[in-house]
Amino acid sequence: MSAPLLADESEAPAPDAAPPEGGPAPAPDPGPDLGEQAAEEFGRRFQVVNIWDNRGFLNISDLVRGGQHYDTAGDGEPAAPRGDGVEPREGDIPAERTALALEGFAEPAWFPDALARLRADRLLFLAGQDGTGRRTAALNLLHRQTGCFALRALDSDTDLTTWTPGTAPARGYLADGLLEPRLTALDTIALDGLRARLERADARMVVVTPCAPAVLAHLGDTLHTPPVRALPPEPRAVLDARLAAVLGGPADVAPALAALPPGLLDETLQPGLRPAQVVEIAAEIVRVVRRGADPESVREHLSFHAADRAPRLLDALRDSPEDLALLLAAGVFEHFDQTLVEEEAGRLLRIADGRLGGTVPDAGEEAPRAVFRRSRTERLEAIGAYVAPAEVHTTSAYSYLTRPVAFTRHLQGRAVLEHVWREHPEAAELLVEWLGTTPSEHGRGDRAGFVLGRCAQWSSGRRALGPVEELAASSRPADWRLAARALGAASTDPVLATAVKARLRGWSRQASVSRRCTVALACATEFGLARPGTALTLLRTVCDGPRDGTGAVASAVRRALLSLFAEPAGRAALLDGLVPWCRAGDATRQAACTATAHLLRAAAAAREPAEWWTRHLLGTRDGSRPGEDPPGLELIRCALAEPDTFPAVRAALLEWQRRAADDPRRAPFVEHLADRLGAAPRGGALRLLSAFEAARPAPGGRRAAEALAAWRRAL
């Protein structure tokens, strides 16, 4: 999980070209197919979604935001993935995500009453502040009441007055982040109708609401359904539960606490502490226990005072442009290598051109500088940062060493950037200018896009997404990826998510190549991964638009489909959704066939999807007719029938066959594929069976030969 999503490692900006007479210049391809590159092994989750939380930039594969759960190794490094990479906002909630919410959950005092109300009424409104563990508690309530993992999420713009469970209802529904107008639009008739629909589906629903006075008054006074107040559980209960879950059991908690400095817990575990803050303390305790860290360093690492310290840091560095540039560069590129952070600080200084408080000579006229000025350590200490121990990273071709820069206090970088954005508008304009021109290589563009998305969350007014819209209208593919990454990060805010969705829906219908590519690429970010149904609809609309003549749109759609497929919980739904594409014809059919070819080629080198593909060659989709191909088989048959995709599919499946000779996990897939294709051999399937037959005694060879013999006899 080391390659950031849409991190462009080898793409160079396309040269500017004059538009041909009478029309615009053809749009360049959006760059290397990174979804394909990153999907070398589907068993490894390749979406890296950077979220600022209590450990700085984190991989959120184990994060239940605002609650009691996120996993790190205790020193700022993310732990191995165990749950889904993105918090689902629409559609089925993966069982792994619910199981993560159940693990180490500290039951608050109001939980039994909420459970009883959910049992009796089928509908529960849960009101609380951000960070109080509302979502984690809601998942526990739904699982405890339904006794199963068949839970589904509803997006923030869901209209509960008209919502219905659908043809395949779940047992529990979580509506988290519903907008205030959606909640205040409910009246008693609509509420009774909602309860009736839940009763017919034998389902329960928890609606997580903000503590806005208008919402609370409407629910209590108008609907006579006062919400349960989700007060955070006792900090010590959260700490004990989390430590027991991480360290192995309650017996291991006491020795871990004994290693802390005297008085630390009394000092930090104050009443009203949010669960997310308590989890940060737990992570620091684990760092001390497992990594032998200095117990006295716990206080200076905790992020509790990061926001208060941000303006003081800026004031202290006001007369040093170099230090200010380094502070901002470290805030954006924390955990990147020290040389990259310094390069970005230098680039910011040049772009600022004196706006940070000093002047920067032209590169060609720069006066000689003393080589022994302040050391790197001194400069980092001035901004409250340090160089972490060296890390070894490995690519498919070589290994290299990095020395990442990190702030001593967690969340300090975020606090600085947020303070700059909110309090210094002119500096915010400089940030946009700098981030918008970030080189895309080595993950820089991915990080810059993420920060631009967070800046949008810190904005207000109708133009919050203005800088992102300008990037989406650019002629440079790197800008499209930057815009897509920013839209993905911005969409984690429930209010801004509605604006992001509206923009993407509008752009998907336009003729503009840049905007349609941006839409497709955004579907490969946390926006699409959290809303796979919406993402598939947007991608279909993009495919149905006018041909761009460059392949840029098709490439962007393909990489989005690959990213969606890499989420195991959504694979079956994705294949079901692609089957109508195959039947549509034209560009939509071609997109589905091309994606299938890439999926098979990427999965040929992986171990994890072997049994998965086998199941989806044998299984049937909901509502399928007798004799109808299962979705996986129909897609493979369709891709074999397309002249453009046949060579890639044939090569991928022959690689499956070759590897199956030494891999008993893979052999059933090849055998079942030969059986299914042999039942009706025609076109590309017939040519593949001939190749399987020629590879005997490899798996599938004998069955292919039998099918071909029967076909010849029938001629």
Image (cartoon, rainbow, N blue to C red):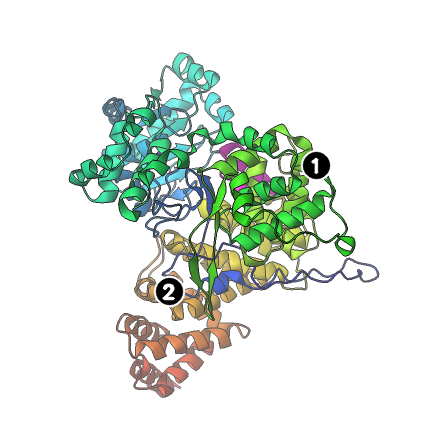
- Amino acid bearing label 2: Asp
Dividing the picture into quadrants, the one containing residue 128 is top left
Disc ID at residue 629: 2
Residue under pointer 1: 357
Q: Is residue 494 magenta?
A: yes
Mark 2–mark 1 Cα distance, whole angstroms, equals 68 Å
Residue 228 can be seen in this image: yes
Q: Nearer the viewer, residue 468 or 347?
A: 347
Secondary structure category for the residue under label 1: loop
Determine which of the numbered discs, if any, sits on residue 79 in the image: none
Residue 571, image x and y in percent? 39, 56
Secondary structure under tag 2 reads: loop
The amino acid type found where label 1 is placed reads: Gly
- Compared to residue 417, the image places residue 565 above or below, namely below
Q: Judge by depth and name the residue closer to the eye, 365 or 644.
A: 365
Task: Identify the magenta region.
Answer: 488-503
The answer to which of 409 and 229 lies nearer the viewer is 409
Depicted 209 relative to depicted 388: above or below:
above
Tell me the quadrant of the picture where the C terminus can be found: bottom left
Q: Quadrant of residue 87?
A: top left
Query: Looking at the picture, does residue 287 appear above or below residue 226?
Result: below
